Amino acid sequence: MNEIEREQRFGAHNYSPLPVVLSHAKGVWVWDVEGNRYLDMMSAYSAVSHGHAHPRLVAALTAQAQRLAVVSRAFYTDRLGAFLERLCDLTTLGGALPMNTGAEAVETAIKAARRWGYSVKRIPAERAEIIVADGNFHGRTTTIVGFSSELAYRADFGPFAPGFIRVPFGDIDAVRAAITPNTCAVLFETIQGEGGIVIPPDGFLRGLRQLCTEQNILMLLDEIQSGLGRTGRWFAYQHEGIVPDGIMLGKALGGGLLPVSAFVARHDVIDLFEPGSHGSTFGGNPLAATVALEALDVMADEDLPGRSAEMGEYLLSRLHAIHSPLIREVRGRGLWAGIEIDPARADAHDLSMRMLRRRVLAKETRSTVLRLAPPLVIERAEIDSCIGALKAVLAEAEGHR
């Protein structure tokens, strides 16, 4: 029994992996069990933004694991405070609540928004509403999939929690029309990653910031994939010069080594949590705090946001220069690109398979978009390799029509 057969036999079939068995990695390169080398153009959906096995992160992980890894939040440690302080300095927000996965950070934001709505805005009990976007992806918990517009994410998992109002992404007039006296927050991704790297119109976030301020509503932004350098800034909302009331972070926060997430918000929001109101056995553990703090330091020391801006401009220029009848549109910001494929001419999953055969790891999303999100340490020559493979794959697919 090989590794693919073993995983398929003993594992739940909630993923459909590409047929490759990976064994080790370094930087932007990954090797399979047969010794073949692949260019990683996914970076685990931004979780490996620093590159695989970054030596500073591995050293920090190893050293801390030998000192103190996990203790309950029933005690203070000498590692968590510095991490939380750094998050607050970066975001210019007042306080942070550490968790593990991105979905947990979103769940934390939802709880915080509702409590703020009842405690501060005086919304009647059990009536708080949160405005979300069509095409959103914030995680896989039952609460979160309950307000997804993707039927496949919701099927057979109900009943779902009420209190969420969906509007078209990027439509400020639709947001305004959805606001009621019971609205406590808007919860949007700054850029929809799973939705296909969908970027809202210029000025949307500025307009949303102004609207939330006017209507006394919390502006909560999911920066789990888009944050920490992915779009060429530390946070994607910085492209419009605004500061939200709360943000959700994850993915790259763990340096590609551990699941680490956080909800960071204004003091008057985060301070509404009290002992017993929220928690996590592993959230904020010393090992995670150490790795996350080092991940932030490495990102600053190596200017990975600036590198993403520079290399992203190059990647997008190379993508826009490809003239293929299979491509409907190229969208992106920083080292994050979505290639919209004409479904009448090609299948995005088939293109992913063809890229795999050319030793490039990429994956489709929403069935029609080929997504590219490499580690932020990628070089021009490696981008050129990806582009060369993509051109060949598009030509192959066009020839097989």
Image (spheres, rainbow, N blue to C red):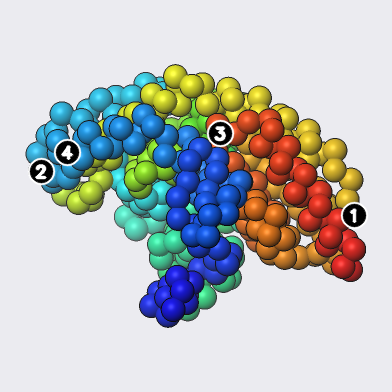
Residue situated in front as seen by the camera: 366 or 19 = 19
Nearer mark to the viewer, of 3 and 4: 4
For the residue labelled by badge 2, is the local secondary structure a helix, a strand or a loop?
loop
Residue 170 at what x, y percent from top left? 66, 43
Within 10 Å of the Cα at label 1, are there few (<14), some (14-19), or many (20+) other Cα atoms?
Answer: few
Checking the image for residue 66, the label placed there is 4
Residue 348 visible in rendering: no
Which circle marks residue 74 in the picture? 2
Marks 1 and 2 sit apart, C-alpha to C-alpha, by 59 Å
Vertical side of 362 occupied by 223: above or below: above
Look at label 1 and name its amino acid. Answer: Pro
Mark 3 or mark 1: whose residue is earlier in sequence: 1
Is 384 rendered above or below residue 115? above
Marks 2 and 4 sit apart, C-alpha to C-alpha, by 21 Å
Which quadrant is home to the N terminus? bottom left
Q: Residue furthest front?
A: 35
- Residue type, numbered disc 3: Leu
Q: In the rendered structure, which amino acid carries the disc numbered 2? A: Ala
